[in-house]
Amino acid sequence: MQDDRSDVAELLGRALSARGMRLVTAESCTGGWIAKRVTDVSGSSAWFEAGFVTYSNRMKAALLGVPESVFASAGAVSEACVRAMVAGALERASGDIAVAVSGIAGPGGGSSDKPVGTVWFGYAQNGGTIEAECHRFEGNRDAVRRAAVDRALRGLLARVGVG
């Protein structure tokens, strides 16, 4: 029997297929785990377009077009950054819907303003507005990353009208 995590990816795949939509991901702290989860689903090539893993600020700028000013003013773990990441991913990969994730999985790297477990998500659809949300997850590095992947998939489901 499959666990709930794979069921979420399968449900997302069915929803995207039914709508003729293609997904793009832009990941930092999740390191490609969202793309892995969706490509674990048989037939995902019909609805998964591309995944960007841009861990460094340099690659966020080069591959996704995040302005250097964002890093200087707000940092990589910020609303401004995920908004730029998701817009850049959607534009560069010609998808229909995209998610971007940037956060602090730990155990180090946190601050009083952005403690370990802080993760920003950006969502966008062609012709639509960009949405961003921040969540704080508890646990070790693995737990934070797992929770972020699950939140991203569930956020995509909600944006395609499921759940």
Image: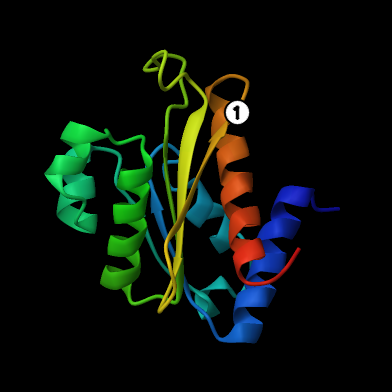
Q: Position of residue 75 (x, y in %)?
A: 27, 33
Look at the numbered disc 1 and give the secondary structure of its residue.
loop
Badge 1 crowding class, 10 Å Cα cut-off, few under 14, some 14 to 19, many 20 or more, is many
The residue lying at 60 percent from left, 37 percent from top is 146
- Residue located at (65% from left, 67% from top): 12
Residue 73: horizontal and vertical position, in percent?
Answer: 20, 34
Is residue 155 rendered to the left or right of residue 4?
left
Farthest right residue in view: 1
Picture quadrant of residue 109: top left
- The residue type indicated by label 1 comes to Phe
- For the point 60% across and 66% down, the residue is 159
Q: Quadrant of residue 139?
A: top right
Q: Could you tell me which quadrant the C terminus lies in? A: bottom right
Residue at 21 percent across and 42 percent down: it is 70
| Residue 79 vs residue 26, the one in the foreground | 79
x and y percentages locating residue 1 in the rendered image: 86, 53
The residue beneath circle 1 is 137
Scheme of colours in the image: rainbow
Place of residue 101 in the rendered image (x, y in percent of width and height, measured from the top left)? 43, 46
On the rendered structure, is 9 left or right of 99?
A: right
